[in-house]
Image: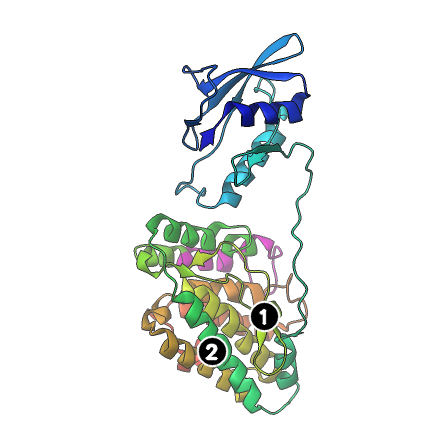
Amino acid sequence: MPLSKPALERYLQARFGSMAKLLSYGVIGKESSKGEQKRYGYGTPVKLTFKVGTRIQSAVLETMKPGPFGHEHMADRAQAMLWDYDSYGRLPRHVKALDVGAFDAKQRLFSLAEAREFFVLNQWTEGTSYHTDLDRLGKGGSLQALDRQRAVTLARYLARIHAKKRRDADLYKRRLRELIGHGECIMGLTDSYPERCGFITHDLLRTVEDACNRWRWRLRDKTNRLSQVHGDFHPYNVLFRTGADFAVLDRSRGEWGEPADDVTAMTINYLLSSLISWGKLKGPFEVLFRLFWDTYVEASGDKEVTETAAPFFAFRGLVVASPLWYPKLSMDIRRSLFRFIENVLDSPRFEPTRVNEYCGR
């Protein structure tokens, strides 16, 4: 990243006042007062010596380079810098953080020191949640041609976005780690269950975690599968407009991952809706469940997805079986979901025709 004396001095003046003057800067031990551009790698600390009025002081400008230890994305590195700024001053004897900032596309520096919370402003789009369709079918509505068309369209959409691959073995392994240990994923969910919820005990939850981690080791070398993903592809994040025209919302946890994450996120909802209505996968939901899987495998050519689905179904199963997220489910439905989780984890590959068997039905 090129750093120039004028850019640094403008930043110092914006942060410390118009009287600030940069005296020298450079990699620690190699400071210079010259003004030509120099190239420094991310993660290389740069010492700045500057004068404000009559006071001369020094500071260290630190950045972070992309890497495989949870630093792959710009947002990861921003999180680390924001945490540093917020926390350094609270630890006795720790050096103080003077500011936190960022570079723009032209390598200009700007301060974020006054920020307390961050937000994103999204475009509004018209549409109706896909969950409305599932609610209609769950209440006895007949399966329409449009229902089939929408399931096919969504499956083909996933096949299309998943066709974009990335070669990054470390990132694939990271996404598997996050599946197990991220606060929004498996361990975060198991920790959110109450002390006891009927048959759902700590021993049962720990057994699920252990099985999922075994699957992580089984999948971790399938790094060629790293694909563009949505990351949270469930019915509430799909808005249908007219016919099969739709938009998606709220992609989560990174743009690259395992394709099975998206496929299981959607299809677990067909199972849940059917369990609520009929106690098993049947009728329109069985049609949509199998149609989605068949369409996806055919459109993507990814027959291996059934060999990677298990821990992702476990993750999504823990969501829909959760008394926190779905407090009105009967204990019988929760039991079917946990049987599904355990049996899928215990099978070498997921078979869409065996769902009721997995549920103990």
Residue at point 69%, 38% (across, down): 116
The colouring scheme, among rainbow, by chain, secondary structure or one colour, is rainbow
Magenta region includes residue 204: yes
Residue at disc 2, secondary structure: loop
Q: How many angstroms separate mark 2 from mark 1 (CA)?
A: 36 Å
Q: Which residue is mark 2?
A: 360
Residue at disc 1, secondary structure: strand
Amino acid at circle 2: Gly
Name the magenta segment's main secondary structure.
helix
Residue 190: horizontal and vertical position, in percent? 54, 56
Amino acid at circle 1: Ala
Image disc number at residue 247: 1
Depth check: give the residue in front, 277 or 336. 277
> In this figure, what is the number of numbered marks?
2
Residue 268: horizontal and vertical position, in percent? 52, 72
Asked whether residue 269 is in view, the answer is yes
Residue at point 43%, 62% (across, down): 311
